[in-house]
Amino acid sequence: MGMNRRDFLRTAAAGSGALLASGVSPAFASMPKELPTGAVGILYDATLCIGCKSCMVNCKKYNSEPGGALYLQGRTASYEVKPGAPFWDSAEDLSSRTVNVIKVNKSGTGLNKDSTDNGFSFIKQHCLHCITPACASVCPVGALKKNPVNGVVHYIENRCIGCRYCMMACPFNIPKYEYESATPQVRKCQLCYHRYDEGKYSACCEFCPTGASIFGKVLDLRKEASRRLTLKPGDEYDFPVQTVDSKQKSRRKVSKYIEHVYGLKEAGGTQYLLLAGVPFEWLGFNRNIKDQFLPDLTWAYIAKIPAVIAGVILAGTATWAVTRKRNKDKEG
Amino acid sequence: MNQKDIKLFTPTTVVLLIVMAVGGLAAFYRLFFGLGASTHLNNAWPWGLWISFDVLGGVALAAGGFVIGGAVYILNWKKYEPIVRPAILNAFFGYALAATSITLDIGVPWRIWHPVIMWQVNSIMFIVAIHVVLYTTTLATESSPLILERLNMKKAVNFVEKIMPAIALFGVLLSLLHQSSLGAVFLIAPEKVSPLWYSSTLPYLFLVSAVLLALSMVSFETILSARVFRHKPPLDILRGLARGSLVVSGLYLLLKLKDLVTGPGVGLAFNGSLVSNMYLLEMIVGIILPFCLLLLKNVRTGVNGIFAVNMLVIIGTVLNRMNVGIVSMAEHNSRMGYDYFPSWMEFSVTMAMIAFAILGFKISVKYLNVLKLEH
Ligand code: SF4
Ligand code: SF4
Ligand code: SF4
């Protein structure tokens, strides 16, 4: 084989040009780890939730409009009402038609609200709008993006190839796929960001009668959540309704909370915060979700790639040159 | 026996064609009616047989191309030159299989090209996609002399052979990266993947096991084709490959044991659950047995012993990919209330891919000078 070292290097370099080009400029690659300045979110307080599922119905209604998370041309809101069901909407779990679900967890006789002992508690499940979202970090085409201002993790349908890596990666199992369709999309809560321009906010909060779900700036929600943890059970408190800074209040007795604001640290922190009277594990949250930025785990691998490229080309070329010479010496 | 004597229309071929026809119909059904109608994928199981077997398995089975290519063109171990062409052609079919399956598996196949222009470098899936595109091109170039020879294009053949070491190096580089990145895909989900498989070393485990599988696969094919063409198997090549397998399986065993001991602990492997038993099966069939057998000199040096070890490694490594892709997440996903077992259409597409690879290889051997047989 009549190739000299220079030819060899030249061909190798030309061939790997494309690869090196992907050699990762850090600015291009970085995943934000700070709460965006204008971050908005939801605070859900399970002790205030009465399980009326108004949020589920209105989530579907307002997200079936153009721009909404469930929008499909020519389709109206689909309420999965079962015959004889006592609710407006009896979807049992998240699906491609349900991006927000109220569930109830029970034990024993199920009589005591917000207790694990012969009790029950509601839980509201939808996208947590992670500060460093795993779903957006794994998407090969950038079809899931975190808005740098309000922090909403939203979906750009016409980029999505449907690989479903986002479903694999989301620690909370939020994104759902339209398997039933031949032209499927990913469906998940997008914090009703299509309503912000008209001065509106999340439908699930607007239509929550008790203030169990309230919308607002994440920093305000965090303050409100920690204030509630300092309240004495049995005392009265004016819980804001609809939004955290609302004039409308609902005066109620404070229940006993567990000492935990879910979403402050989990998976690096989220813009959806939760309070409850029972442990979150009991409500179905995976206990293996750690306080860590998940995209760091894959980034640790990706960051090594440029060095591997350089190392392999150098070492490979050197090896080739040495072994070829040795073979020649042997022959000659 | 020579190329002309290879009969194309044997009963086996007919069976392969039928399998391909059934799978082809299933693939069409999937394209027109969607994934829900054709597969058992669901809200908790985004990935199933096609990702685990066809993509993870197919790419691993194709590792022979870069391992032998690297040995012959970079390390200049000319002893292995006779097997470099079948190894690379085999890799080409492995990748074709993986690429076809991934096209069927993604929900919107007509956007398969999106990653090439919509870069998202945080995503391992993006890295994998780019590598598959580049590497399939590389493999096509590496195999091009087969076609060019047939067309009597001497100049072109000479040119490709001249730059072959550079192409081979590029192939080695790409393969190192994406064999490992297929393992890295699962790093994002520590809360879902069972600790029996989850480890920060997953990328290295995928790479090392792919090399082990490569050696076995190439050796397996060499023995098989020797039987088909009724010539004597090249013993020194087979013995060299077996020595390599011994070293690599020892390393792989060490890495796996280290992960088990420093990770979940040995107890988890023996708790009797289905998941743990699948782990044990993979460890015994794919790693422990092959390693122990290869330690025996008469196994390592005889054709039958080597053949048996090859079978074990092939089954064991494919099992590993199925375990990582499916079994490792079974406990987490069934807690969400969903089970998964592939539908008959998923199975038939996968079987069709395998049939296609076998038949494609056979046709190539007949019409192209793959095995460098005397004319
Ligand atoms: S909860 Fe899941 S889907 Fe929502 S932003 Fe976080 S990772 Fe993405
Ligand atoms: S399914 Fe779509 S949104 Fe999800 S990771 Fe794949 S391309 Fe991105
Ligand atoms: S924020 Fe909007 S999309 Fe999200 S759960 Fe509430 S209503 Fe549904």
Image (cartoon, rainbow, N blue to C red):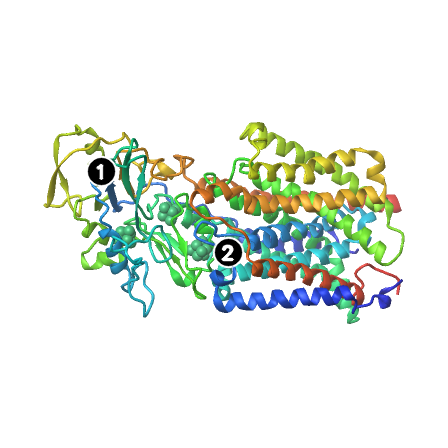
Indicate the quadrant where residue A319 lies. Answer: top right
Question: Would residue B105 be seen by someone viewing this image from the given angle?
Answer: yes
Residue under the image location 65 percent in, 37 percent down: B283
The disc numbered 1 marks a residue on which chain?
A
* B341 w.r.t. A184: above or below: above
Pointer 1 with pointer 2, Cβ within 8 A: no
Q: Are marks 1 and 2 on the same chain?
A: no
Residue type, numbered disc 2:
His
Return the residue at label 2.
B40
Q: Residues within 10 Å of mark 1 (few under 14, many from 20)?
A: many
Q: Nearer the viewer, residue A233 or B60?
A: A233
Q: Residue at x 63, y 59 (%)?
A: B97
> Residue A150: image x %, image y %?
27, 49
- Residue A270 located left or right of residue B194: left
- Residue A233: x and y in percent read 17, 29
Compare residues B36 and A202 and report the one nearer the observer.
B36
Q: Chain of mark 2?
A: B
Image coordinates of residue B152 in percent, x first then y, are: 80, 71
Q: Quadrant of the N terminus of chain A?
A: bottom right
> Could you tell me how far apart the alpha carbons at marks 1 and 2 are, in whole angstroms?
38 Å
Residue that mark 1 sits on: A47
Tell me, yes or no, if residue B181 can be seen here: no
* Left or right of B232, for residue B191: left
Quarter of image, res A74: bottom left
Identify the residue at horizontal 47%, vertical 43% (top origin): B188
Task: Indicate left or right for A179 with A193 as reference.
Answer: right
The amino acid pointed to by label 1 is Thr
When the figure is inspected, residue A34 is found, relative to residue B138, above or below; the finding is: above
Tag 2's secondary structure?
loop
Q: Which mark is residue B218?
A: none
In this image, B227 relative to B311: left or right? right
